[in-house]
Image: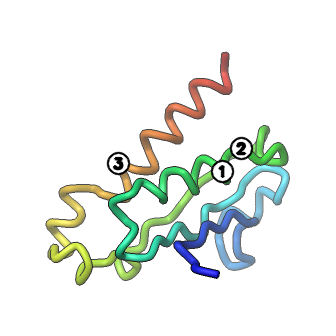
Amino acid sequence: MFDLGDGVLADPDPDERWVDLGSQVMMEVKAIEVCRSWRSCRIAPAMLRRLMEKPQIEEKIIYMVGYSWTWDLKGTRKTALQYQLTAISERMFSVYILHYSSLSRV
């Protein structure tokens, strides 16, 4: 079996400030990771779509934290500033999440 990547959606960690709201309100996209050789195949947005299709999140606020130490600077051959300016992760996540939010209001 070949692992292309992982996507994790879970309750906030106990030390996160969001935990005070309870698991019935917030969930975090903990990870979206794709094998470098497959990153140009749009697998990460597909993984995020699958996470967002889960019925148990219909009434929840989903968030993600993009820590700079998780960025693949070596694989993208960018500096931290270049990565931030191109907003690779922000572009991928915000487009879908905004799209999903507007659909859920209809």
In the shown orientation, is residue 2 left or right of residue 73?
right
* x then y, percent, for residue 48: 57, 53
Report the quarter where the C terminus lies.
top right
Disc 1: CA contacts within 10 A as few (<14), some (14-19) or many (>=20) = few
> Can you tell which of label 2 and label 3 is closer to the viewer?
2
Q: CA distance from mark 1 to mark 2?
A: 5 Å
Q: Earlier in the sequence, mark 2 or mark 3?
A: 2
Q: Which mark is residue 53?
A: 2
The quadrant of the picture occupied by the N terminus is bottom right
Instruction: Report the amino acid beneath label 2.
Output: Glu
Q: Which residue is mark 3?
A: 91
Query: At numbered mark 3, what does the secondary structure look like: helix, strand or loop?
Result: helix
For label 2, the crowd category at 10 Å Cα-Cα, with few meaning under 14, some 14 to 19 and many 20 or more, is: few
Counting residues from the start of the chain, the first of labels 3 and 1 encountered is: 1
CA separation in Å, label 3 and label 1:
18 Å
Q: Kindly identify which numbered label has been placed on residue 8.
A: none
Residue 92: x and y in percent read 40, 50
Based on the displayed image, in which of its 4 quarters is residue 10 positioned? bottom right
Toward which corner of the image does residue 7 lie, by quadrant? bottom right
| Residues at discs 3 and 1 in contact (Cβ within 8 Å) | no
State the colouring used for the structure image: rainbow
Horizontal and vertical percent position of residue 60: 75, 45
Indicate which label's residue lies in the foreground, 3 or 1: 1
Amino acid type, mark 3: Arg
Res. 50 mark: 1
**Secondary element at tag 2:** loop
Q: Residue at x 44, y 76 (%)?
A: 35
User: Could you tell me which residue is drawn at 77 percent across and 63 percent down?
Assistant: 20
